[in-house]
Structure formats: structure tokens, C-alpha cells
Image (cartoon, rainbow, N blue to C red):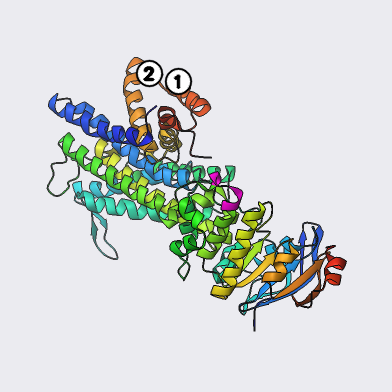
Amino acid sequence: MSLLTTSNVTASYGASQALFGVDLSIGEGEVRALLGRNGMGKSTTVKCICRMLAANGTLTFNGTDLTRLPSHRAARLGLGLVPEGRRCFGNLTVHENLIAAARPGDWTFERVVEMFPRLGERRNQNASSLSGGEQQMLAIGRALMTNPRLLILDEATEGLAPIIRQEIWSVIRKLKAETGLSILVIDKSIRELRDVCDSATILERGKSVWDGTIHELTDDITTTYIGV
Amino acid sequence: MIRETYLNALTLGLFVLIPAWALFADEPFTITLMTRAAIFAIAAIGLNIALGIGGLVSLGHAVFFGIGGYAMGILAYHAQTYTALAEWPVLIDGTKSMPIIWLVAVLVSSLAALVIGALSLRTAGVYFIMITLAFGQMFFFFTISWAEYGGEDGLSIYVRNGFPGLNTLAPIQFYGLCFVILCLVLLFTWRLSKSPFGLALNAARQAPVRVETVGLDPTRLKLVAFVISGAITGLAGALFADLNRFVSPTMFSWQTSGEIMIFLILGGVGRLYGPVVGALAFVALEHWLGGLSDYWHIYLGILLLLIVLFGRGGLIGLASGKEAVHD
């Protein structure tokens, strides 16, 4: 049984429709890539799943209908979002950012610091004074502190130095290997996604146009839809 | 430039040294002034939780200050006239005991804050300011026409209420009581601001949408903060009424709400000791400038203008050279 199912999801920003039917499903322990060119609806799909944008169609998480839930209730069901552009709580320290979001479970401050030793070193530093890479780690740590069942990474490696990107990817691989957490990854780096993901969904003009395992995702398909 | 921690210690030190000096120099009026400052500080600490941490610009905190005052006034009035507060369904007598009065003040003002907060938090920004102000005016005009408890003239309580083991009529003993409560409220607020709840509230002020994505309901956080805030200001109201042995609708007036906010802006919004410094500075100015001219508010206005323009961190921000911690 899949953990998250969306079927025929449509959504609009005011008068302009952005999603025209997105079908997506993620199983327990599955790591899925959500692919597509810029402006094809990837982030909008995430906003619909996390209830930050009104959506029509079917959206169920672990058997619960999401469409009518407010954002914080959806998050409490186990949706852990690492938002695009990091968005930490700027005037709280690293430690404060993490404990403000904490909910009971396996993920504690100590465990997050073990995963990201840099956050331990910066424990009492304000989040706004961290580097981009550190802020990204904090955003991932904050999402883990809510003890989610599904982690959603929206452009988690965007605009970071290559070495930091590698660090983020190795954390994602580690999460997959050690915790069996379900993860939905949005990213531009196909090579890394091939390495870590089990499956992929491609969006084009607000519609899901391709769905399959990562092995079925041939170069022909990526060239057709994404241009790489 | 002095570090903020030293500045805070200095402030607390003044609250010990000035009354101690006044006691030896036999200046009971100074002790009364310091009591006034301590009580104003408690009221403003209450507002600081809503405004400083939660970002809720409430122009109606006089409601809670007044409710605290009237809780004291009504209970003590029935005790001094030997009449029952209520006879049905159970007989309720008045009381002259401070702990009971404080408990009633805190409970009733919390309840009022829950109702007012639940309604006001449906709005935001300027509408929130207006709706809290409207609630304040409602209570103000209600008490003016509440003839049973003195209406516009208010209620006089002849003897200050009692606290077990203390002679509250001695200014220094009543001051000591207020000072201990001030310290406890400060400790509570400090712990609150560092607790997950306080941190989440702080985050909800900055970024309500981001708080939601980690599973926290910003409206609920703000409502809880508003209730705690109202309870503390209510407690200050009960103490203030006991200091003056008098309550009147003035405690509910919008000027009172404004003054509580002035203490906060003067000292530094969102800083733990902001309300304490602000209340002390206000009482000092009121005393000295008030002695110079009846129109001393104009000087206060100029000072406030300068602080808002040049020292957004309030007096603490100016003295410690730290930029405003508040947005």
C-alpha cells in the first residue's frame, strides 16, 4: 500500500491554472524523484501535498484525505517538508530552530547533530548567520525533528557549492540506507537522482506524463522531457 | 557600552537598593514609587509575551489590568461591607486575602483573554489593534455604568488586603511582595521564551507559514500566548488596585493600554528586561518631570519619539549598543 497517493490533482494560482492532473504515489520506504523543467509544476505539487495551496482531486496520506486539512495538520500526520530556499527561523539559534519543531520520535537533537556535525559546532549561532549549506542542513534537520514518515526535499541542493552538494546527497543516501524513510526528491541533478532514487515521476505543463522505476528512466526519456 | 546582562543586573539591583535606601532614609513615598514601578513592570511583562514574542499588537491590555483591579475591588468591597458576593447557587463571600484575590484575578483575566483572543485572532494587523481596542472600550463603558460598584467614581477599599505572615500596610513589606512576584514573573517569562513553545511562538511571529509546515498551528500558539499575557497583566492589575486601595474605570481606559505599551517601547520590545527598565524609567520621569510641569507628557512624547526614531531597541538597546532584536 502506498503512503502518499495523489490522483488527478489540479490547482490554480488565482485565475491561472498550474496543475492539470498530477498522479503520484510513494510507497513505504520508497525514494522517488519528481522531475520536470522549470515551471512545470514540481513545487506547486509539493505545495498541494503540504496543503499550502488549495487542490482538487485525490490526495491521501497513509489513508487520510489531505484535501481539507490545514497545513499544520498535514505536517502532523508525518509530512516533513524541506522547503525550497531553506527558510530557517532566522533569529533563532541552530539549537532553538531544531527544538522548536521537535515532536516525539527517534529523531532527537543529538541524532540530528550526529548526522550533521557542523550543526553541533554552530549550536548557539543564529540561523541567519549560517552559510547557505549550513542553513540547508538545518532545514533538513528541522524537518527530521518532526519525525516525519515522508520527507519532501524541494531543491535541497540548489545554489550550493559542489562539495556541500555531495554532503547533502550522502545524507540522503544515508537516510535511505539506515532509516527506510520515504523520500520525495525534487532536484535538477539527474546523475545523483539515478544513484539514490528507486523511481521517478515526470511532470510536464502541470501533468504527470511519465512514471516508472529509475531503471526504466532511459536517457531518451530524460532528453525528451527534461532536455538532459 | 554596557553588556545587556550587566544592564539587567543593574536594573534589578536598583529595585533592591533604592527601596533599601528609602527605608533607612525614612522616605516611604519613594518605596511607593518603586512599588508602582514594579507593578507596572509586571503588567508590561504580560504585554511583552503577546507583543514582544508573539508579535500581537494589543491595544486592549487595559482589559486585563482592569479585570485584575476589579477582582480585587469587588471581593474586598463585599468583605468590608459584610455582604455576600452571590447567594445563589452557592453562597460566595468577599475576601481580604491577597492569594485568593490574585487567583481570581488571574483566572478571570485568562478567561477574558481566551474569549477576546479567540475573536481577535481571526483578524491581523491594524484590525487586530482595532478589535482589541474596541474590547477595552466595551469594558470601560460597562464599568462606568456599573452603579453597584461605584460606576464612574470607582470603589475605595479602606484597608489594604492581607497576606499571611506580612503586614501589607507597611510600604516596604508590600513592596517586597510585589518585588518577589516581579522576579517570579521574570523567571517564568525567561523559561517560557526558551521553551519549545516560546521558540515556536517567536518563529510564528517571523514566519507563520513556515511554522505550519513543521506541524505547528500559529493561531493556537498566539492564542495561548495571549491568555498567558492577559493572566500576568491581570495579576498586575490586582496588585495596582491594592497599592492605591482604589479601583475605577480608568484602569480599563485606552490610555492605560497605551501606557503599558509605552513601558515596553521605552525599555525595549521583545527583551526580557525591556518592560522592567521601561516601567522604572516611566515612573522616574512621571515623578521628576511631573514635578516640573503639569504638561510633562510632552517631554515623555519627545523622548518616545527619539527612542522610536534612533534607538529601536529601547533604552536597553541604546545603552548596550545592540541593534533591535525585534522586527
Res. B149 in view: no
Question: Looking at the rendering, in which quadrant would you find the N terminus of chain B?
Answer: top left
Chief SS of the magenta region: helix
- Count of numbered circles on the image: 2
Question: Looking at the rendering, in which quadrant would you find the C terminus of chain B?
Answer: top right
Observer-nearest residue: B156 or A222? A222
Disc 1 target residue: B298
Whole-angstrom CA distance, mark 1 to mark 2, is 10 Å
Magenta region, residue range: A128-134
Residue A34: quarter of image: bottom right
Disc 2 target residue: B294
The residue positioned 28% from the left and 54% from the top of the image is B103
Q: Chain of mark 2?
A: B
Where does residue A128 sit, x and y in percent of width and height?
A: 55, 45
> Please, is residue B260 above or below residue B233 in the view?
above
Where does residue B274 sit, x and y in percent of width and height?
A: 39, 36
Identified by mark 1, the residue type is: Ile
